[in-house]
Amino acid sequence: RNEKQGTRNEKKRKYCKEAKDLPLTLFARSTMYVILYLFYGAVAFFIFPELFVYPAHYNPLPLIGIFILMLYAACFFSQTLAYCFRIRESALLIMVVTSIIFIFIPGLIWPRESIPTLINIFSFFIPATCGIDGIIKINQNGAVFMNVLYDYLWLMFLCLFYFITAIYLTKKLDKTFE
C-alpha cells in the first residue's frame, strides 16, 4: 500500500503537532475554503446580474456579510461532521444520499410551511437555512442589515457552535491516535 495516499484518519495521524495550534489551524483551513467560495459568490451575485441584466437593487455589504458567515458556518459544520467518517468514500456516499434532503430543508425549493415541524426545527442547525433565507431577503427584496439581523445572529451562533464542536471532536480524535 502506498504510504502517501490516505487521509489523516486513515493514517492515524494527529491534526496538529501542538494541541494549542488546533483552533488556529481549523480557522485557517476554513478561511481558505471561504476564500475559494467567495469567487463563486462574486460570479453569482455580481457578474451574472450584470452579464444577464438581472435587476439588482440591493446593498452589497449585507449580502457579502451574510454570505461569508454562511460559508464559515458551513465549513465548521462540515469539519464537525468529518468526525463521523473514518474513510473518505463513506462521506461521499452519505453526501449523495442526503443531498436531496439538504436541498429541500432550507425552504428554497419546497415551502417551509409544508415541512413538518420537527424537521423544520432541525433545519435551523444547518447553516444554509438562515444563510439562504437572508440572501434571498437581501437579493430579492432589497432588505437592509436590520431586516436580516436574526439571520446574522443565528449564523454567528452556528459559526461559534460548530467551531467549538469541531475543535472538541478533533481533539477527541487526536487522542485516539496517541
Image (cartoon, rainbow, N blue to C red):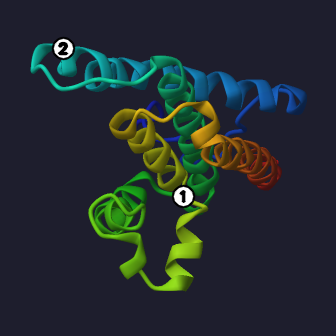
Q: Which mark is residue 165?
A: none
Identify which residue is drawn at 36% across, 60% down: 95
Nearer mark to the viewer, of 2 and 1: 2
Above or below 31: residue 71: below
Residue that lies at the very extreme toward the right in this rendered image: 20
Q: Amino acid at mark 1?
A: Ile
Crowding at dot 1, Cα within 10 Å, few <14 / some 14-19 / many 20+, comes out as some
Residue 78 as seen in the image, left or right of residue 105: right
Disc 1 secondary structure class: loop
Q: Amino acid at mark 2?
A: Glu
Q: Position of residue 53 (x, y in %)?
A: 12, 19
In the depicted view, which residue is nearer to us: 120 or 141?
Answer: 141
Residue occupying the point 74% across, 48% down:
157
Tell me the crowding category of disc 2: few under 14, some 14 to 19, or many 20 or more residues within 10 angstroms, Cα based.
Answer: few
The residue sitting at 41% across, 67% down in the picture is: 105
In the picture, residue 48 is in which quadrant? top left
| Position of residue 14 measured from the top left corner of the image (x, y, whole percent) | 72, 38
Residue at 71% from the left image edge and 41% from the top image edge: 156
Sequence-first disc among 2 and 1 = 2
Q: Can residue 93 be seen from the camera position used here? A: no
Left or right placement of residue 46 versus residue 169 in this view = left
Residue 70 vertical position relative to residue 47 in the rendered view, above or below: below
- For numbered disc 2, what is the local secondary structure? helix
Q: Position of residue 59 (x, y in %)?
A: 46, 20
Does the rendering let one see residue 30?
A: yes
In the visual, does 157 lie left or right of 47? right
Which corner quadrant holds the N terminus? top left
Query: Which residue is under mark 1?
Result: 126
**Disc number for residue 50:** 2
Image coordinates of residue 169 in percent, x first then y, are: 75, 53
